């Protein structure tokens, strides 16, 4: 009896989370997959006709939005790495006993609503805002120069809003590094750059790997930043899916686009994992 309980204990502990995933993830996903193959409308109703053309039509009509979303997501993710790694490195190795304080200061703005932070970013980037207005008055920028309604504004908002998703995993990976390994590298006459290239960065790869996945997926599917900071020429696929669901009530097209985006993200993550080498990442994580 005790053996049976011992064998069942892990599964019983996993049962609440498993049920949660089944009810709120698996079942909705299966239903959405079914809806993506339907035809009809909100008035006459929807019928299951296995209409695979919903997927090809979505790619034909909104293919440019998909490409733009992937491109914006890639740029924003790279920008997050460039900003997050130095910050996480400094906090992990130079923060001392105030590491928690620095992390709290870094995360403090993100206790505010996502939408409010995006609107605040819009106020910063507006033509008469605290950044562009002084530069224009000093003659450093032309009067007709603007940042809003541009791809740069959208990418800036995405980078700002999702930066913590990159900082925290990298910080955790750097914090786990045994400083004696770094000291040993210095004892072997390695310079600072060589220590970073051969010791610190390889050991922090698990954090970078996790940060990229946690950032790239929500950034690519985001629609708030493009709505608030972008213009008609900066629409992302998330905006299209939102409009198809809530404005046009075209549930089949929206579901097909959602699965298409999901498939592209999964392929991108798989290619990224293969290129980075998941075995090397797992080996570094286990050290």
Image: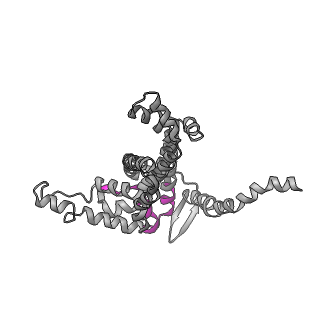
Give the percent coordinates (x, y) of residue 142: 12, 55
**Residue 251 belongs to the span the image colors magenta:** yes
Who's the residue at 36% across and 60% down the image? 225
Who's the residue at 78% across and 57% down the image? 9
| Figure label count | 0
Q: Is residue 149 left or right of residue 9?
A: left
Q: Nearer the viewer, residue 114 or 27?
A: 114
The secondary structure making up most of the magenta span is helix
Give the percent coordinates (x, y) of residue 152: 29, 53
Q: Nearer the viewer, residue 23 or 251?
A: 23
Seen from this angle, which residue lies furthest bottom? 43
In the image, residue 62 above or below residue 244: above
Give the percent coordinates (x, y) of residue 205: 49, 41
Who's the residue at 37% across and 56% down the image? 158
* Residue 57 seen: no
Q: Nearer the viewer, residue 82 or 31?
A: 82
Seen from this angle, which residue lies furthest right? 1
Give the percent coordinates (x, y) of residue 53: 50, 51
State the extent of the magenta-drawn residues as a range.
Answer: 233-256
Q: Nearer the viewer, residue 133 or 195?
A: 195
Q: Where does the C terminus fall, quadrant-wise? A: top right
Colour scheme shown: one colour
**Residue 207 belongs to the span the image colors magenta:** no
* Residue 95 seen: yes
Q: Where does the N terminus fall, quadrant-wise? A: bottom right
In the image, residue 140 above or below residue 184: below
Q: Is residue 260 left or right of residue 117?
A: right
Seen from this angle, which residue lies furthest top? 188
Who's the residue at 41% across and 31% down the image? 194
């Amino acid at each position: 009896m005790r053996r049976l309980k011992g064998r069942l204990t892990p599964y019983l502990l996993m049962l609440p989370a498993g049920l949660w995933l089944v009810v709120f993830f698996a079942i909705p996903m299966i239903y959405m997959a079914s809806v993506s193959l339907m035809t009809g409308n909100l008035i006459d109703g929807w019928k299951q006709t296995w209409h695979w053309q919903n997927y090809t039509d979505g790619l034909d009509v909104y293919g440019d939005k998909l490409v733009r979303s992937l491109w914006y997501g890639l740029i924003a993710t790279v920008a997050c790495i460039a900003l997050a790694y130095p910050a996480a490195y400094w906090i992990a190795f130079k923060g001392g006993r105030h590491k928690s304080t620095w992390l709290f200061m870094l995360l403090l703005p993100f206790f505010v609503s996502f939408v409010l932070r995006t609107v605040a970013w819009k106020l910063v980037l507006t033509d008469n805002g605290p950044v562009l207005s002084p530069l224009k008055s000093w003659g450093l920028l032309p009067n007709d120069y603007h940042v809003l309604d541009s791809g740069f504004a959208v990418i800036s908002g995405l980078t700002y809003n999702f930066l913590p998703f990159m900082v925290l995993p990298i910080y955790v990976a750097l914090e786990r590094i045994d400083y004696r390994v770094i000291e040993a590298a210095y004892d072997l006459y390695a310079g600072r750059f060589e220590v970073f290239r051969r010791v610190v960065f390889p050991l922090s790869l698990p954090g970078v790997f996790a940060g990229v996945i946690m950032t790239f997926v929500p950034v690519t599917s985001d629609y708030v930043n493009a709505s608030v900071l972008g213009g008609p020429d900066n629409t992302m696929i998330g905006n299209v899916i939102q409009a198809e669901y809530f404005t046009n009530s075209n549930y089949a097209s929206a579901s097909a686009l959602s699965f298409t985006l999901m498939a592209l993200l999964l392929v991108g993550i798989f290619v990224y994992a293969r290129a980075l080498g998941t075995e090397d990442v797992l080996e570094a994580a286990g050290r």
